[in-house]
Image (cartoon, rainbow, N blue to C red):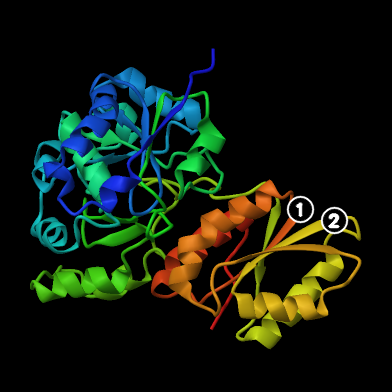
């Protein structure tokens, strides 16, 4: 039987002059979904990265329901979200100095730390692993929601497994309407891709999934606090982890996003190769010659300058739908809009979706990680 999904609009709280935790309106608005979380119900909520589908880790049935609602493989571990830094300590059996300084400097933020778990973290949250991923989201509404619930909350992205992650509440409703009771609307997600997952459970730090915090930022934080490791090449391995040069074994997923195809629309995703507008346009036109036929619907996700150049040379007999993330090439804007763009083009039945690419460095690492998985292919060599 379908559930009547209620969207709780909390966007006004973000614009209030007073702190959310001191707001009577916030407490009244979030009390119901917080109580639902504590009682073992599944609730969708915003973060700075993407919307999450949350369940109290101490309610096995609620955690199992996440896997069922998403169609998610149960060997894919979940990340535990907390509302304050102090809530991390009971969840871990070891809290190294590296974790301490990263939490101090980079949380709240789009960073997940993988640490040895304590006995209170259930197997169905960690997929039976002896580690747990933990993060403190940088979203005022959700941190207050988690504080009101007063329980650790396991939460993957609030979408059907394998599809583009949701960055708006309406994306969650599109995928899961009738399957869950509450969706907290906190507006558009600021980052647009999931958190960086950093493994601190054994040996030097390694990125398992690139995201909103770059490897360089993590390294700067660690070195700035005098953190070092005995392995001679640990800094270089950290910088390479999460890229196409990663040394991490993706067949043993200690983090979401490592093993299975993710972020994929119904249409076939093709990566645009090129170092400037001219070469990118040439690559688009070359690809289109071999894709589909005159009845096919094509989509493009790119900056407006590139889209305009493509349109000028586009074959008149073929239909093109465009999603522009911004006026010129900009990795931060592209990352912010990627999932929304893929969903937009999918809803308009684009059979082939051509997507602008960026070099695999900085935020480009997270962007290209999501894009390559969406395309189900191998990395391009992009300078």
Q: Earlier in the sequence, mark 2 or mark 1?
A: 2
Seen in the image, is 264 located left or right of residue 93? right
Can residue 138 be seen from the camera position used here?
Answer: yes
Please tell me which residue is depicted at 49% across the width and 39% down the height of the picture: 172
Q: Is residue 276 above or below residue 107?
A: below
Q: Relative to the observer, which residue lies in front, 309 or 198?
A: 309
The residue positioned 22% from the left and 30% from the top of the image is: 28
For disc 2, the marked residue is: 296
Residue beneath disc 1: 351
Q: Residues within 10 Å of mark 1 (few under 14, many from 20)?
A: some
For the image shown, how many numbered marks are present on the structure? 2
Q: Is residue 61 above or below residue 85?
A: above
Mark 2 surroundings within 10 Å by alpha-carbon count, few (fewer than 14), some (14 through 19), many (20 or more): some
Taking 302 as reference, is 121 above or below it? above
- Residue at 39 percent across and 23 percent down: it is 64
Q: Measured from the top left, where is residue 156 in percent x and y?
A: 39, 40
Is residue 40 left or right of 356 when viewed as pictured?
left
CA distance for labels 2 and 1: 7 Å
- Image quarter hosting the N terminus: top right
Instruction: Work out which residue is located at the far top of the displayed protein and give it.
Output: 1
Q: Position of residue 366 (x, y in %)?
A: 43, 64
Q: Is the residue under label 1 in contact with that under label 2 (CB below 8 Å)?
A: yes
Task: Find residue 338 and report its horizontal and vertical position in percent.
Answer: 53, 60
Give SS at disc 1: loop
Q: Is residue 364 visible?
A: no
Q: In the visual, does 356 lie left or right of 80? A: right
């Amino acid at each position: 039987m379908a559930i009547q999904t209620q969207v709780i609009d909390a966007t006004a709280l973000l614009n209030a002059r007073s702190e959310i935790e001191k707001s009577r309106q916030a407490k009244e608005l979030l009390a119901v979904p917080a109580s639902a979380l504590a009682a073992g119900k599944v609730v969708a909520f915003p973060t700075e990265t993407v919307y999450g589908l949350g369940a109290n880790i101490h309610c096995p049935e609620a955690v199992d329901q996440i896997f069922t609602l998403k169609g998610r493989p149960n060997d894919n571990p979940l990340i535990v979200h907390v509302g304050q830094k102090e809530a991390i300590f009971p969840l871990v059996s070891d809290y190294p100095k590296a974790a301490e300084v990263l939490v101090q400097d980079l949380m709240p933020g789009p960073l997940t730390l993988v640490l040895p778990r304590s006995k209170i973290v259930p197997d169905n949250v960690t997929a039976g692993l002896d580690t747990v991923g933990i993060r403190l989201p940088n979203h005022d509404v959700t941190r207050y929601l988690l504080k009101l619930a007063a329980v650790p909350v396991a939460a993957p992205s609030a979408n059907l497994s394998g599809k583009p992650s949701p960055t708006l509440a309406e994306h969650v409703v599109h995928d899961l309407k009738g399957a869950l009771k509450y969706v907290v609307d906190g507006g558009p997600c600021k980052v647009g891709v999931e958190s960086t997952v950093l493994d601190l459970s054994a040996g030097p730090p390694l990125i398992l999934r690139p995201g909103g915090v770059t490897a360089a930022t993590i390294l700067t934080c660690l070195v700035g606090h005098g953190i070092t490791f005995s392995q001679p090449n640990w800094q270089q391995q950290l910088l390479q982890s999460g890229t196409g040069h990663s040394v991490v074994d993706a067949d043993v997923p200690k983090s979401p996003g490592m093993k299975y195809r993710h972020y994929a629309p119904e249409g076939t995703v093709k990566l645009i190769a090129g170092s400037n507008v001219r070469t990118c346009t040439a690559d688009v036109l070359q690809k289109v010659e071999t894709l589909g036929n005159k009845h096919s619907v094509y989509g493009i996700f790119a900056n407006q300058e590139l889209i305009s150049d493509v349109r000028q040379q586009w074959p008149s007999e073929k239909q093109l739908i465009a999603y522009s993330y911004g006026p010129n090439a900009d990795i931060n804007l592209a990352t912010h809009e990627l999932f929304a763009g893929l969903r937009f083009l999918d809803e308009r039945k684009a059979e082939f979706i051509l997507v602008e690419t960026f070099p695999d460095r900085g935020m480009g690492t997270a962007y290209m990680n999501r894009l390559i998985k969406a395309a189900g292919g191998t990395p391009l060599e992009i300078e």
